[in-house]
């Protein structure tokens, strides 16, 4: 396997990064019990439209293994139903009163809608599930946040919202960690997406590469993050035995996780 640069390193089958204030784990698809297109460490319960979801019992085993890696029980790992928006939840931010809307995907969990989770509590972690979108951890001296950064979330202002949520919980210099996700080597989008992210005008036709990692890094810096590290691994052209990829596998695939917690 490719050796990442510091602060990232392989710990067993997964990537770990340690910085002052916290740690982040970016899982791969290795080391689980799921089968078929979800083999093997799939952490998501929802299946693609028209496709059967993974076996819930297998997902439960996989989640337990990740919880053991983190040292926090799975039910103490904060998560939301990801909708490519900008909402970030934390112990000080209550979920919407109306509760979650019915999920369109079979097997989806009844979680509040949120694409980011922050916490200042020891013995608790924050996580997102991904399969090409970027898992982005931001770590401060007194709190941490994990963000699910696809292009829609980046365009909606998720990064700034995540840093704001972190500021409500603590202060100090912030360090960001960008985990494995779609790279500019493989991720092409239409002119509407480029325009939504502040790129070239929408009048330009055809799909062109876009660098979500660079855009995320720019927005992190603009939000006040003093240090940004990118693991520089693409889930689309990376080893298919290591990473799930929604685009590579035409939507029939599992989910890996980004998990962050306080040291």
Image (cartoon, rainbow, N blue to C red):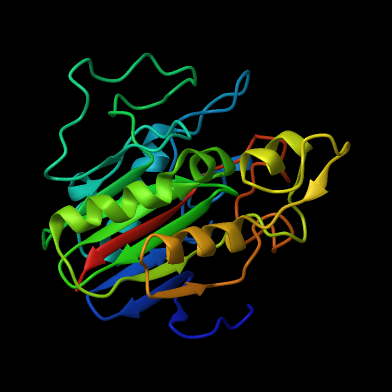
Residue 8 or 210: which is nearer the viewer? 210
Q: Position of residue 93 (x, y in %)?
A: 16, 39
Task: Tell me what residue is drawn at x 44 percent, y 47 percent.
Answer: 148
Residue 140 position by quadrant: bottom left
Q: Quadrant of the C terminus?
A: bottom left
Residue 173 position by quadrant: bottom left
Q: Position of residue 102 (x, y in %)?
A: 38, 14
Residue 100 or 106: which is nearer the viewer? 100
Task: Tell me what residue is drawn at x 34 percent, y 58 percent.
Answer: 259
Task: Tell me what residue is drawn at x 69 percent, y 40 percent.
Answer: 195
Q: Compared with residue 125, is residue 88 higher up or lower down, i.e. above or below?
A: above
Residue 61 or 182: which is nearer the viewer? 182
Can residue 62 be seen?
Answer: no
Give the left or right position of residue 30, taking residue 159 as reference. Answer: right
Task: Tell me what residue is drawn at x 44 percent, y 46 percent.
Answer: 129
Give the left or right position of residue 137, taking residue 34 as reference. Answer: left
């Amino acid at each position: 396997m490719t050796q990442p640069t510091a602060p990232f390193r392989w710990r067993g089958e997964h990537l770990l990064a340690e910085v002052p204030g916290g740690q982040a784990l970016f899982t791969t698809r290795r080391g689980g019990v799921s089968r078929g297109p979800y083999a093997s460490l799939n952490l998501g319960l929802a299946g693609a439209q028209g496709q059967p979801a993974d076996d819930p019992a297998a997902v439960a085993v996989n989640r337990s293994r990740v919880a053991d890696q983190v040292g926090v029980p799975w039910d103490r790992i904060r998560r939301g139903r990801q909708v490519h928006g900008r909402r970030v939840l934390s112990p000080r931010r209550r979920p919407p009163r109306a509760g979650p809307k019915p999920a369109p995907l079979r097997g989806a969990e009844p979680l509040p809608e949120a694409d980011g989770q922050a916490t200042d509590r020891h013995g608790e972690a924050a996580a997102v599930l991904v399969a090409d979108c970027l898992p982005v951890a931001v770590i401060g001296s007194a709190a941490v946040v994990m963000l699910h950064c696809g292009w829609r979330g980046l365009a909606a202002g998720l990064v700034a919202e995540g840093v704001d949520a972190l500021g409500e919980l603590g202060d100090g210099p912030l360090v960001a960690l960008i985990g494995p996700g779609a790279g500019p080597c493989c991720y092409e989008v239409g002119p509407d997406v480029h325009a939504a992210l502040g790129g070239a005008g929408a009048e330009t036709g055809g799909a062109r590469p876009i660098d979500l990692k660079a855009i995320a890094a720019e927005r992190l810096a603009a939000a006040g993050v003093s240090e940004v590290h990118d693991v520089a691994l693409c889930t689309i052209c990376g080893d298919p035995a290591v990473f799930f990829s929604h685009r590579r596998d035409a939507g029939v695939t599992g989910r890996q996780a980004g998990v962050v917690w306080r040291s």
